[in-house]
Amino acid sequence: MRPTRSPRLVAAALCALAVLAAAGCGAAPEASSAAPAESAATGGRTSYPLTFDNCGTKVTFREPPRRVLILNGTSVGEVESFVLLGLEKSILANAQHYGVSDDPSMIARIGALPTGGLTMNKNFDVPAEQVLKLKPDLVVSTWSGGFDAKRGFATREQLAAAGITSLVNPVNCAMGKPEATPEEQRAYRNQSINSSLEFIGLLGRVFDVQERALRLIGELRARVEAVRARVAGRPARKVLVAYPGMAMMNANGLPAVMTGGIYDDVIKAAGGVNAFAGQTADMTRTLNREQLATAQVDVLVVGLFTPDENAGREAAKLFAAYPHWAASKSRTYTVVSDGVYLGPLNAWAVEKISKVVHPGG
């Protein structure tokens, strides 16, 4: 896999800001809602044509897609879901890359996928003319903004006119969609580990691999539930997830501190509580040094964004900068990368974090 490049870092910051504007992130997360009907895999064979609503767009699949383009969107969760489902042969071109992973095998597996010779435009995704020239039968985007003409991308209408189906990860409908419905905004705010599993179920239906999807969902859920059972009843220690390599996402040049939604859910499953629990993505952008210094932090989770980052060194820097943290005094930390994001590797992160939140037993 290619190492993450600096333009991608900038893209992450831009994407985060876009999320704030599109999803109305001012409210605290609510209780997780039930899985949307279109995401549920039944375990049986898919009956084609398969038609459902995806972020307000009616999509129809007459057979399993065979030429899939996965857009960048500063995400890696969609391509990882394809890989874990064994759908690599259906990928015509993949634009999602990440230089480090909580699943060591994932880097090479994604690196082996075709890229189609695609290049990114100034908004760090595949421009419309390249998408249309490639002639995929399905284009997958992690967010609605991946089909925004103002960013130079092909619209869903353009793709449909060319006989190309488009698909947005349903939990991210509100991202980049100014007219997002209250339900779509609520789904985005309430992202959880279950949201990651729902996308696997959706792919299972679309590609007629529902039994495979249900088996994978069951395996991943069982790993998370095993951790929940192990830490049940223990005190929830305060956990801070910080990505030093994403400091450009913070207005004060601090490490990107991840809060809300799926980050809170991953930490909770590991037996902890986010040091900034209940906050939204806006906290990542506005957090200042005083807030960070006065936070209660029992466990530091260092997030890696590029393969050349040294987690031990970054942890030592944070401990020196914030000596009043309990984590600084005990030197308690662990390391994650993509496992705390929306995607199929949440179980890896939950297991890693739980071992330092509640070691042993």
Image (spheres, helix red, strand yellow):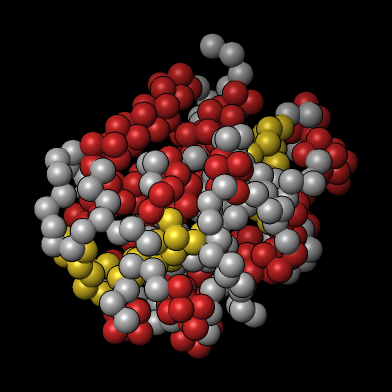
Quadrant position of the C terminus in the picture: top right
Point out residue 87 in the picture as x, y percentages from the top left corner: 38, 47
**Rendered position, 298 above or below 260:** above
* Residue occupying the point 61% across, 34% down: 104
Q: Nearer the viewer, residue 86 or 180?
A: 86
Is any atom of residue 347 visible in this view? yes
Point out residue 116 in the picture as x, y percentages from the top left corner: 53, 65
* Residue occupying the point 26% across, 43% down: 209
Residue 159: name its quadrant.
bottom left
Point out residue 92 in the picture as x, y percentages from the top left corner: 44, 60
Outermost residue toward the bottom?
150
Is any atom of residue 75 visible in this view? no
Describe residue 339's horizontal placement relative to residue 331 as left or right.
left
* Residue occupying the point 68% across, 36% down: 335
Point out residue 228 in the picture as x, y percentages from the top left corner: 43, 26
Describe residue 309's horizontal placement relative to residue 155 as left or right.
right
**Rendered position, 10 above or below 295:** below
**Rendered position, 350 above or below 88:** above
* Residue occupying the point 66% across, 44% down: 100
Q: Nearer the viewer, residue 197 or 324?
A: 197
